[in-house]
Image (cartoon, rainbow, N blue to C red):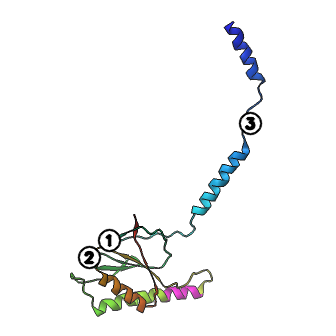
Amino acid sequence: MANKRFIRNRTRRGNAEPFELEMSSLLDILVILLVFLLKNYSVDEFALKINKGISIPDSISKTLTRKGVTIQMSKDFEVFIEEKLITTLENDGAWTDEQDVLIKNELLALKENTEQIEMQSDKASGFNGIINLIMDRELSYEHIDKIMDISADSGYEQFKFIVIES
C-alpha cells in the first residue's frame, strides 16, 4: 500500500506545471536598490592624506567639504600646504615674519596656478577660495587664527575644518 501512495504522488508531481517566479516583486526590489545606490553615489572623489603626528578633533557634523587647498599643522608646529612641508615653527610655536611670507607665497603661487589652469581649460573649476584646515587638536587657537589670517591675506575666503565624525 505504501508503494501505491508513492507511485500516486509521483504521478501527481509529474503532472504539475513548472514553477513561475513573480517578476513584479523582483523588479520592485531592483528599483529600490537602484534608487538607494544612486542617492548614495558620489561622483566627486575627495580624499585627504593626513600627515603623521596630527590628531584630528572629533565632531558630530556630517557636512562634506569641497576641494580646496589643504593646510595641515601638527602638534610639533610643522606647517604643510598640499602635503608639502613649508616651515616648522620654533619649539614654543612662535611665528616669525619669514614664516608668514613663506606660507603666503605658497598660497599665492597655488592661487595663480589655479587661475592659469582655468584660463587654459574650459573644464577647470577655477579658484574657489576654499582652505581645508587640518589642525592637531592640541594646537592653541592663536595658531589656527594665524593660519586663517595668512590665508585670508592671500585671497582665500572660506575655511573648512577637517574633523573626524564621532
Q: Amino acid at mark 3?
A: Glu
Magenta segment range?
112-119
Q: Main secondary structure of the magenta part?
A: helix
Residue 78 in the figure: left or right of residue 22? left
The structure residue drawn at horizontal position 64% and vertical position 54%, both measured from the top left corner, is 32
Comes first in the chain, label 1 or label 3: 3
Query: Residue 54 bears which disc, if any?
Result: 1
Is residue 116 one of those drawn in magenta?
Answer: yes
Secondary structure of the residue carrying numbered label 1 = loop
Along the viewing direction, whichever of 62 and 56 lies nearer the viewer: 62
Q: Residues within 10 Å of mark 3 (few under 14, many from 20)?
A: few
User: Can the viewer see residue 87 in this picture?
Assistant: no
Closest to the observer, 15 or 111? 15
Q: Which residue is mark 3?
A: 20
In magenta segment, residue 31: no
Q: Which mark is residue 76?
A: 2
